[in-house]
Amino acid sequence: MSRQAAAQQLRTAAPAVIEAYRAELQRLGSPLATRDDAWQQCRYQAQNIVAECAQSLETGRPAEVSGVGEYSRLLGAHRVTQRIPVSESVRAAEVLWEAMREAVARAAEQLPAEQRHSVQQEISTTFRTVTGARLYQGIRGYEEAARPEGPAGRPPGPSGLKEQADLEPQALEVLTLREREILEAVREGLTNRQISRRFEITEATVKRHLHNAYRKLGISSRVQALNKMFPEGR
């Protein structure tokens, strides 16, 4: 019994997971499953999420996949054209996890009994990380595509551009180097645990730095912090 066997079990279950995922989305009447164009995109994302969970299970490390953020952001923007609310993607993430639960439990059975619970928790954490990063970028893409260009459809004037350009430097000035580094890691979609490992600090210290950064920036959440620090997704 090994991680490799558990990962292979999860990979083998992937087609059934995707089938159950679509069936539930259809039952809910989600356009992500009832429209062929949207389902092709949705299935692609779901297949990659399951594959990343299996890879992380096999290696014991977070999966590193390039291009995911950019694709998710473009897909979020495309949802505006498709007239599919961004809330459908949020709901779909929960539906996918429910479709994966049984497969995750069976994969964990490939490991010694004392490891099964922790491995299931590990896969859950990986799932939340990879879906959270995709949702964040997708929501940003959706909001940017849905945002009016300016009065009467005109682009923002010089003063508006200047305010936007000045926003990041002003935010940077009030933060410590460590606070900026942690916000950069948040921007990458890392969890507090992953950030603590990267910088070799405790999760409590990560939370303290985030709290201090939020207070200095006058905001209360990760999304608000990133919008203020990186208004153009730089």
Image: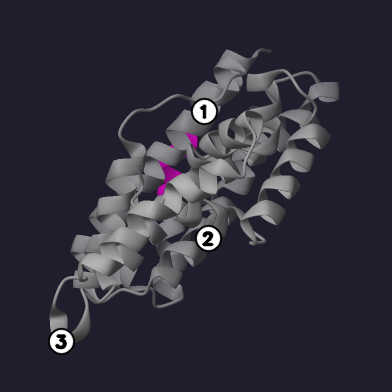
- 87 in the magenta segment: no
Q: Are marks 3 and 2 in contact (CB under 8 Å)?
A: no
- 16 in the magenta segment: yes
Q: Is residue 109 left or right of residue 8?
A: right
The residue stretch that appears in magenta: 12-18
Q: Is residue 212 above or below residue 109?
A: below
Q: Is residue 193 left or right of residue 185?
A: right
Under circle 1, the secondary element is helix
Q: Residue furthest right?
A: 114
Give how far across and how far down residue 152 sits, in percent: 15, 86
| Type of amino acid at the residue the image marks with label 3 | Ala
| Type of amino acid at the residue the image marks with label 1 | Ala
- Residue tagged 1: 54
Residue 152 - label: 3
Q: Nearer the viewer, residue 234 or 12?
A: 234
Of the 4 image quadrants, the one containing the C terminus is top left
Which callout, 2 or 1, points at the residue further toward the start of the chain? Answer: 1
